[in-house]
């Protein structure tokens, strides 16, 4: 089995893990468990990026999503200390009837995906390595407007947080 | 099927590095603890462990046996899965970072092996980001342990640790990015090779500042004194691992030392030139005969010995700090990170980027 074979195997394994853990995120009744599965799913997605030849994206996915954003989520959820009461509430929300809508959407998506793969199997594995330089050039070349907009949004969030956290003088 | 040559290739490029790395990790995991006790003891005018073996040399083995034999207690109201998983996550993430670190240039061990083997398991081209990624996932081990123990002290420890690690990851990342700017690469071997002319710690003006920032936030990331708030024993019993016992407690212990090694290795690689020999001012004083002779002697020491020397210097520094400094208060810890280190690191990055643009770096 060559390097490409390993990468294919890695792709399928991490894809499977991502799907299963995402499913578990929805069905877990304990919020903390759901969040932990969400982290697993993010890590699996990072591995998918890696197997598709984008190690830089994989590292960023782990550092930013799994490492920074989810830590804050977990932090807040653990601080709220949701116990058995909220788990019961969750189980009331997750009635069988609620699954119908999402299932239809998912079947449509899965159909599209299968169609895509059967049409052109070569498209599955874009094995060109995409390094940090290419990502940087893309971000600050054609997509520079998006980067600027995102940074303005983040700045607004930062100022908002600062305003809320400012000590009040009476 | 694998033919013989391919098999030999795998043995050289994967088998030998992994075996050596494992031996290195295990030896350190066991003996750093003795080193710490000895260093602390001598700094406080004591002798440290003396009874088990010559000067306590067998003490770590006795301790490991004790860890293994003790009962592994899981509290009745704890979340069993998360509780038992937490130490593994911390430990695996610490091990994972060590895979990417190069321990020297490819070598044939003075002709002992028929061909050169790499002294790394993986020479990833975004290596330094992977170390950051592993260390950020390691945070979950601490948070999960704190939450799953179902104990207010553990939970407080977990919270503190989460907040601390998020806060100090930012100046750490910025100081790493400064190094990446200076070297122009995310690959750890390239970062070492970029320091052939001058080590980044003496690359004025940004080098020393970035080094200081990295050192400070590295100590905080590993929860060592003076930033050991998550396990402050006078307020939190033992913080997030209060409820742990036996081998799981031993794993937390081991992970702390592993993280120390990773942070120290990165500091040596990024700022002290990794396996490159330290030279006394080769450009200005290098032509004077005695200094040139000393420089030649220093250059004759094998590269990996240099890296290990730098590594243990940093580890000694950590232990020295533990014997010297009192613990910070929690609000001090937060304001150091957000009010001092973060602006300083942003400024350093800005200056470095400007200098790079002007071609002065």
Image (cartoon, helix red, strand yellow):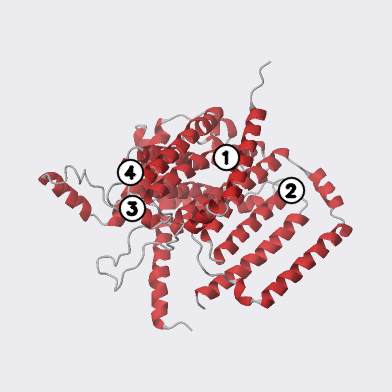
Query: Which mark sits nearer the N-terminus, 4 or 1?
Result: 1
Residue at x 74%, y 60% (from the top left corner): A23
Q: What's the CA distance linking mark 1 and mark 2?
A: 21 Å
Q: Which residue is mark 3?
A: B194
Q: Which residue is mark 2?
A: A31
Co-location on one chain, circles 1 and 2: no
**Residue B248 seen in render:** no
- Of B91 and B47, the residue lying toward us: B91
Across and down, in percent, residue A45 comes to 62, 60
Co-location on one chain, circles 4 and 1: yes
Q: Chain of mark 1?
A: B
Quadrant that contains the C terminus of chain B: top left
Q: What's the CA distance linking mark 4 and mark 1?
A: 39 Å
Across and down, in percent, residue A117 comes to 67, 74
Co-location on one chain, circles 4 and 2: no
* Crowd tier of the residue under label 1, counting other residues whose Cα lies within 10 Å: few below 14, some 14–19, many 20 or above: many
The answer to which quarter of the image holds residue B347 is top left
Q: Chain of mark 4?
A: B
Q: What's the CA distance linking mark 2 and mark 3?
A: 47 Å
Instruction: State yes or no: discs 2 and 3 in contact (Cβ < 8 Å).
Output: no
| Disc marking residue B103 | none
- As displayed, is residue A166 above or below residue B65? above
Q: Which residue is mark 4?
A: B360
Q: Which residue is mark 1?
A: B161
Q: Is residue B99 left or right of residue B190?
A: right
- Could you tell me which secondary element the residue under label 1 belongs to? helix
Query: Marks 4 and 2: which is nearer the front?
Result: 4
Across and down, in percent, residue B144 comes to 63, 47
Q: Is residue B108 left or right of residue B321?
A: left
Query: Marks 1 and 3: which is nearer the front?
Result: 3
- Could you tell me which secondary element the residue under label 4 belongs to? loop
Query: Which mark sits nearer the N-terminus, 1 or 3?
Result: 1
């Amino acid at each position: 089995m060559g390097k490409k074979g390993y990468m294919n195997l890695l792709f399928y394994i991490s894809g499977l893990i991502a799907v299963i853990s995402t499913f578990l995120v929805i069905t877990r009744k304990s919020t903390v468990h759901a969040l932990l599965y969400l982290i697993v799913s993010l890590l699996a997605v990072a591995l998918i990026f890696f197997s598709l030849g984008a190690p830089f994206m994989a590292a960023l996915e782990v550092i930013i999503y799994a490492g920074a954003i989810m830590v804050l989520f977990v932090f807040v959820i653990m601080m709220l200390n949701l116990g058995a009461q909220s788990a019961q509430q969750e189980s009331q929300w997750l009635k069988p009837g609620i699954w119908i809508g999402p299932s239809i959407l998912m079947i449509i998506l899965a159909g599209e995906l299968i169609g895509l793969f059967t049409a052109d199997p070569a498209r599955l594995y874009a094995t060109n390595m995409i390094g940090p330089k290419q990502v940087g050039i893309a971000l600050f070349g054609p997509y520079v407007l998006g980067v600027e907009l995102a940074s303005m949004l983040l700045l607004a969030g930062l100022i908002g947080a600062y305003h809320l956290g400012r000590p009040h003088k009476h | 099927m694998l033919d013989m040559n391919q098999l030999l290739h795998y043995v050289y490029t994967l088998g030998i590095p992994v075996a050596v790395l494992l031996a290195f990790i295990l030896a350190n995991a066991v003996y750093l603890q003795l080193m710490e006790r000895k260093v602390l003891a001598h700094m406080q005018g004591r002798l440290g462990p003396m009874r088990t073996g010559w000067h306590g040399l067998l003490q770590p083995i006795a301790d490991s046996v004790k860890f293994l034999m003790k009962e592994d207690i899981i509290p009745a109201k704890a979340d069993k899965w998360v509780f038992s998983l937490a130490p593994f996550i911390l430990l695996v993430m610490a091990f994972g970072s060590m895979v990417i670190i190069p321990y020297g240039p490819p070598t044939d061990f003075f002709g002992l092996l028929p061909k050169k083997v790499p002294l790394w398991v993986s020479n990833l081209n975004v290596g330094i980001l992977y170390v950051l990624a592993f260390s950020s996932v390691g945070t979950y081990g601490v948070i999960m342990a704190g939450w799953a123990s179902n104990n207010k002290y553990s939970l407080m420890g977990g919270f503190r640790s989460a907040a601390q690690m998020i806060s100090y990851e930012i100046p750490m990342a910025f100081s790493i990015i400064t190094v990446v700017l200076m070297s122009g690469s995310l690959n750890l071997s390239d970062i070492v090779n970029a320091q052939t002319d001058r080590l980044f710690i003496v690359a004025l003006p940004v080098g020393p500042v970035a080094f200081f920032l990295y050192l400070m936030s590295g100590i905080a990331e590993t929860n060592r004194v003076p930033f050991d708030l998550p396990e402050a024993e006078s307020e939190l019993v033992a913080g997030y691992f209060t409820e742990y016992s036996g081998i799981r407690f031993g794993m937390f212990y081991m992970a702390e030392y592993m993280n120390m090694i990773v942070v120290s290795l990165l500091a040596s690689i990024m700022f002290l030139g990794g396996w490159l020999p330290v030279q006394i001012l080769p450009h200005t004083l290098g032509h004077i005969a005695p200094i040139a002779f000393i420089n030649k002697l220093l250059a004759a020491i094998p590269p990996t010995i240099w890296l290990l020397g730098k590594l243990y210097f940093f580890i000694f520094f950590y232990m020295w700090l533990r014997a010297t400094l009192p613990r910070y208060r929690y609000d001090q810890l937060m304001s150091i990170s957000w009010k001092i280190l973060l602006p300083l690191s942003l400024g350093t990055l800005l200056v470095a980027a400007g200098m790079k643009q002007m071609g002065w770096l």
